[in-house]
Image (cartoon, grey):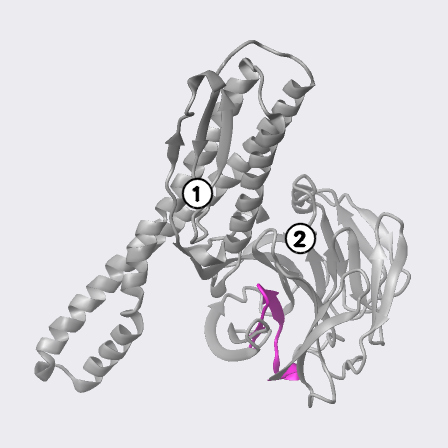
Amino acid sequence: MQSAGKLMSLTLLILMGSELTEVLPANPEDSWQVYSSAQDSEGRCVCTVVAPQQTMCSRDARTRQLRQLLEKVQNMTQSIQSLDQRTQKDLQYVQRMEVQLRGLETKFRQVEENHKQNFAKQFKAIKARMEELRPMIPVLEEYKADAKMVMQFKEEVKNLTSVLNELQEEMGTYDYEELHSRVSSLEERLRACMQKLACGKLTGISDPITIKTSGSRYGSWMTDPVASDGDTRVWYMDGYHNNRFVREYKSMEDFMTTDNFTSHRLPHPWSGTGQVVYNGSIYFNKFQSHTIIKFDFKTASISKTSQLDYAGFNNRYHYSWGGHSDIDLMVDEGGLWAIYATNQNAGNIVISKLNPNTLQIIKSWNTNHPKRSAGEAFMICGTLYVTNGYSGGTKVYYAFSTNSSTYEYIDIPFQNKYSHISMLDYNPRDRALYAWNNGHQVLYNVTLFHVIRSEEL
């Protein structure tokens, strides 16, 4: 069974580059060697390391500090390797797409040359398809060239690791603070690059992967999107009302293979299936109210409550499947969100960004999509995606971007394997959709598309 963290197939177009250079000291007696890739005015990703020539061994506190730096760089190396694997996989996909596009272009030219011998309807259909895909060809060419940036970034981290290993073996006099500063700078730039690479526009949803079959027809399950790397606990909530008990499984493997769990009793029953676990707390809508509750699992107590003013509740503005699904809480790369509807917005969906500590609304967006007509909804990178139903043939067909306050109609099908979806939420850490499908806990891989320009980094 694939783990949730390996489900993402991220399609990226990276429009930037970097060069690795070697700068030698003006005076060799200074005992410094500088390996650097300087950041230029266009904001290309760089990293720098300063390494002394090998001199006498000094096993003092700075040795331990250097070892800690080495561990941090090794962690960054793992991140780079993961990024490289995803990029190489996507590059293969892009190359196959390029072959198909060029084949279609050739076919189009043949049809265009001999269009008098073909049916007019076929000719128009092929021409329209070609015009739609033609702009992709130069973009794919750029991707093939710019994918080398990831390899160069990987090589820089490899060089940094090598130098730190040498320092650990024979460490002489060096400026630790400067070395630490430069390693920290590389770490920050890597984190920024990873964050940019994580986001994008939804372009595809994979076939479902059934993790478990359990519970009733309705429910929700999730993992904490900001938990530490070693924390893979699964949270499980059966039903959509008149229930207060949340199951905690120690890991995804335990959830899949055993029925061993810890039970947490909430102070109030929840409403709907729009709960979310975020940073060690569960956020849920109190039954038959527009009250949002933040419950801390560590202290087993309510840490915050707030009223979601004007939000419909008690099956007034539910999703099309019903189930008291008036208020849906969710998390993406940007934080905590609430999806609901109000009389003031004529029953159409309202998107509100919430402060996870105070539960106060930071900003709201009114959409033109009726809440009752939506099958389910989820947020990715600040965009709300809405499905056209919850049973039978299902697709994502509406998207509202909070970044631009605009909407569009799209057509992204996904397989509704068990014919009744009552929960669909995105997890930004796993980069996957979690679904409750008629008593089955299911995961979907998502494909995101984003062009990253050098000025963004």
Q: CA distance from mark 2 to mark 1?
A: 22 Å
Q: What residue is at 31 percent from the left and 51 percent from the top?
A: 144
Q: Residue 404's x, y, as percent?
A: 55, 75
Name the kind of residue labelled 1 in the image: Gln
The quarter of the picture where residue 21 lies is top left
For label 1, the residue is 85
The quarter of the picture where residue 281 lies is bottom right
Residue stretch rendered in magenta on the structure: 369-388
Can the viewer see residue 406? yes
Q: Is residue 49 left or right of residue 120?
A: right
The N terminus, quarter of image: top right
Is residue 118 in the magenta section? no
Number of callouts in the render?
2
Q: Residue 106's x, y, as percent?
A: 16, 66
For label 2, the residue is 225
Q: What residue is at 51 percent from the left and 49 percent from the top?
A: 193
Name the kind of residue labelled 2 in the image: Pro
Q: Is residue 147 left or right of residue 173?
A: left
Closer to the camera, 252 or 87?
Answer: 87
Is residue 371 in the magenta section? yes
Secondary structure beneath label 1 = helix
Secondary structure beneath label 2 = loop
Q: Residue 241's x, y, as percent?
A: 81, 69
